[in-house]
Amino acid sequence: MKIRRILATAVAAAVTTPVVFLSATPAFADTKPGTTAEARNKKPTLDELRLAVTKAQAVYDAAVVADSDAQRAMDEFDKPGNPLSVARIAAKKASDEAAAAKVTADGELKKAQDAQAALPAEATQEQKDAAKKAVDDAQKSADEAKATAETKAAAYAAADKTYDDASVELSRKIGKAQKAKADALKALDAAKKELADAQEEPGEDDCVDDKNFVTTLTGPAKVTAGTSAVFNLRVTNKGKFTFDEVGGSALAYSMEDGEDEHFSVAWSSVNSPKWQTLDSFDEEEGFSSLSAVKPGGSFDFKLKVTVDAKAKAADAVLAGGGGYQNKDGACGVTDEGAFAGFAVVKPTKPAPGKDTDKGGSTTGGNGNTTQQGGSSNTSVTSGSTGGTLAKTGSGSATLPIGLAGGVAVVLGAGAMVLVRRRKAGADA
């Protein structure tokens, strides 16, 4: 009881300073997170880390494909049927044949020249003319063979250069693809490590503050002492990944003296329709959706606040918050808690002569309702004010992050703490 009183008193002291009541019906002013919360919020969320891994994986996959394509292109290039290779081989053959023809033509020229030089002095003019013609014809053939050989050699040089350039370019592409693949793998490993580090739970306070996990509270403006009223705590997934299981905890207390002894909270949902009393200071307490909440979806918890007849007429507050636990071990909590202010009022005495045996007293908030919590895709924002939910952890068979242990709401500092069940419960 001492812990309950200390926490409740601390809660009230912290809350009453920044909260402004505009009328008999409490209205809570919006509060902005403090510097510490702002610094925390700059850290990437699990959704952002998962998205980073997804993007890094896509880049790596593309790099693997590019590397495979480059390797395949080189393999195709090295095949005998490669057009550049065929052209190069043909050019080489033509060049070699032209060079051989030039050698033959040069030999014929030398033979003609030697024959001309070997004519005897008494050779006839006809013999001299024939020898000269043979030399001239051989010279012409040699010149043509030389030109052809040079042309074919140039064509082969060009084909060879084209082949070599293509080979070098493919090798360069393979090198770039392999480097891109290595860089992408390095980035992917880094992204996976960052996500894994965020998902590790070496201690109780390792769940990340996740702005995509949003809680809102709505309910009646007043509750009559001696009755109950039902509030609605809505958990909304504004991220891109499914929350495998969500849950939370809640606490109601007087704003006048910070006491919670005249208040009790019970919860229910569509998956747990029976009202279950909630003790936020019991390590085994808390509530769970027992189901997943997809991106853009919501899940509703009904919170029945019972105010006993001894409660003073004063302003009061119901504070709630929660978190999620995923199958991969990732967990997170809302970085802003949810608050609903209400006035505790005393029962109105019936006027003289009125028949008080007919009909019953009202609760000021439909406290006898049997409506249960459930799933919804409609966001609820009215009737709640923002705070900040500090880190919670995991544990329990129903919801490993279990969110129990105690609720301390600190509007002035912009922080709200829900202490979770220990991780041992999750490992059981």
Image: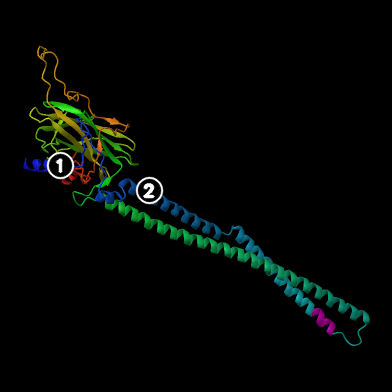
* Residue under the point 74% across and 74% down: 104
Location of residue 396 in the rendering, given as x and y in whole percent from the top left corner: 18, 41
Location of residue 428 in the rendering, given as x and y in whole percent from the top left corner: 17, 44
Q: Identify the secondary structure beneath mark 1.
A: helix
Q: Is residue 115 magenta?
A: yes
Which quarter of the picture shows residue 214?
A: top left
Looking at the image, is 31 positioned above or below residue 120?
A: above
Labels 1 & 2 near each other (Cβ < 8 A): no
Of the pair 379 and 149, the residue shown nearer to us: 379
Q: Which residues are magenta?
A: 111-117
Q: Which residue is mark 1?
A: 11
Q: Quadrant of the N terminus?
A: top left
Of the pair 77 and 415, the residue shown nearer to us: 415
Q: CA distance from mark 1 to mark 2?
A: 42 Å
Looking at the image, is 219 positioned above or below residue 145?
A: above
Which quarter of the picture shows residue 114?
A: bottom right
**Disc 2 marks which amino acid?**
Thr
Looking at the image, is 95 positioned above or below residue 27?
A: below
Q: Which residue is mark 2?
A: 54
